[in-house]
Amino acid sequence: MGTSDLHGYIENWDYFKDAEYDDAAGNDVGLAKISALANQVRADRGEANTLLIDAGDTIQGTSLTDYFANVEPITETGEIHPMAAAMNAMDYDAAALGNHEFNYGTDLLAEFEDQLDFPLLAANAVDENTGKPAFTPYIIKTVKPKGNKPIKVGILGLTNPGIAIWDKGNVEGKLRFPDLVETAAKYVPRMKAAGADVVVVSAHSGTSGTSSYGDGLPLENAATQVAEEVPGIDAILVGHAHQEIPEHFVTNKTTGEQVLLTEPLNWGMRLSVMDFELTKVRGKWDVTSASSSLLNANTVEPDPVVSGLVRDAHQRVIDYVNTPVGTATESMPAAESRYRDTAVIDFVNEVQADAVERALAGTENAGLPVLSIAAPFSRTAVIPEGPVTIRDIAGLYVFPNTLYAVDMTGAQIKDYLEYSAKYFVQTAPGAPIDPETLTNADGTPDYNYDMFSGISYDIDISQPAGQRITNLMYDGAALDPAQHFAVATNNYRQSGGGNFPHIATAPVLLNQQTEIRQLLIDYVVANQSIDPSAFAEENWRLVRAGVPVFG
């Protein structure tokens, strides 16, 4: 059995909405429900015949995980992490490391690892100094079916090379992340030599064969390549891509054997169940067939054992996120933020720019004009009129990104904006406009569309990508290509996430190591009010041949 991309979901609860989780497809989420499914499988197949593994991204993604990383960090309290408590109770056998495991630093990850009754696997997370694996590469579990000789199941863990970019601040100089295919080719023969009858790879890597970053790092989504190029693998539990793959077979190029791939939907919505049939051949077990299916978490009630273990932690987080920290003078929804200038994104940019200005004051860079960039992370977030809670702010800024500032020129900013503007579908003047189909061109996600504050510009969506930015102005005049600016951004973007031009190589002016989400909370606490009239400014707009798309 396999899970992946749990992202801190234990109960079927949405902390941002303060309500039971619900989506249009009727999905349920969380380990409590997955535990109930696992118990059913164990009862059906026989507990002695089953194993339970995970493919990573476990300790980041909800207010629950943020709480035990930042508010009451397990590194300080010694309290067992709720995800550790739940997974231990569920008798997990192993879990691969995901890239988000590194978001809160290696100290917190080490504490989490120590709390687990099972190993965290990452054969391609290598200690920069010693060249040796920093985590357990693989394990071999012995399964003892009733009336048969024991079967040895090898489980190899592979993580994502993108960690070197996405969490550069936490891993640079400590860890490197070699290619998945190269690493699997190294370890699968060792597992076979150690007696593995069945080889399963738990890979925090999707199947698409693509990368979200540029050249220079091994392939991000390499599960298909691992199956094709490394002989001896029977199945891969796929993660990272947040996709649903009930059963998919890939032919190994060397052996011609079929390799089973399956990916359960994220957040504990699905449980992958892989079945293997084995036959004795010349005294050794041989996998004669493999199949997989997905079980849906919405078909069961939560396991009361898991729910009971985390009840106190769950309630503490609910109480915390519902704590008012200030008020807003008017409602600021994010629903339209991806295609028009909104006050709620201006709020993020205001806080980022203010923090950078204060940090640079008194330094040699104090004279640089400060700009800021932010992306629309959520289409459903709202800063409500009246009392504003931590939950409201966390729902707006859903990632634990930290604040950076870099030095960029006007010419580089123009390039950056052109790259960002490829997010829009080219639409001729006079053609009907549907906001639902106007964005996400070529699959570009919302979080890879950035908006600037501190300058003004138009985006002409009637033009092809790369030729869309017009009327680019700073302080009432055309932007000088040679002028230098301090640009407030986040660690994901500064480290190359999204593959935007110039920003990853731009001189770093500030690396504050403070979560932007916390800066937003601190701003509200300090000012006791969010008043859009103090910062909201329509400094960019969509146009077609100079005519605004929206009023």
Image (spheres, rainbow, N blue to C red):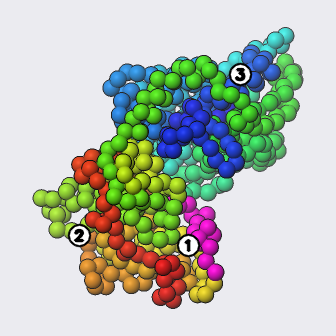
Q: Which type of secondary structure does the marked residue at label 2 adopt? A: loop
Residue range in magenta is: 432-448
Choose the circle earlier in sequence order: 1 or 2.
Answer: 2
> Percent from the top left, x then y, of residue 522?
28, 47
Element carrying mark 1: loop
What's the residue type where badge 3 is placed? Asn
Task: Give the labeled residue for mark 2.
Answer: 369
Secondary structure at numbered mark 3? helix
State whether residue 131 appears in this view: no
Q: CA distance from mark 1 to mark 3?
A: 46 Å
Q: Which residue is mark 3?
A: 39
Where is mark 1, residue-wise? 424
Q: For the residues marked 3 and 2, what is the alpha-carbon distance in whole angstroms?
A: 59 Å
Q: Which badge, 3 or 2, is on the more N-terminal residue?
A: 3
User: Is residue 509 part of the magenta span, yes or no?
Assistant: no
Is residue 435 on the magenta stretch? yes
Q: Is residue 177 above or below residue 318?
A: below
Q: Are marks 1 and 3 in contact (CB under 8 Å)?
A: no
Residue 35: quadrant of the picture: top right
Q: Amino acid at mark 1?
A: Phe
In front here: 442 or 122? 442
Please state if 214 lies on the left or on the right of 234 as rendered. Answer: left
Classify mark 3: residues with Cα within 10 Å, few (<14), some (14-19) or many (20+): some
Gap between marks 1 and 2 measured at Cα? 28 Å
Q: Look at 75% across and 20% down and name the residue there.
A: 42
* Residue at (82% x, 36% y) in the render: 291
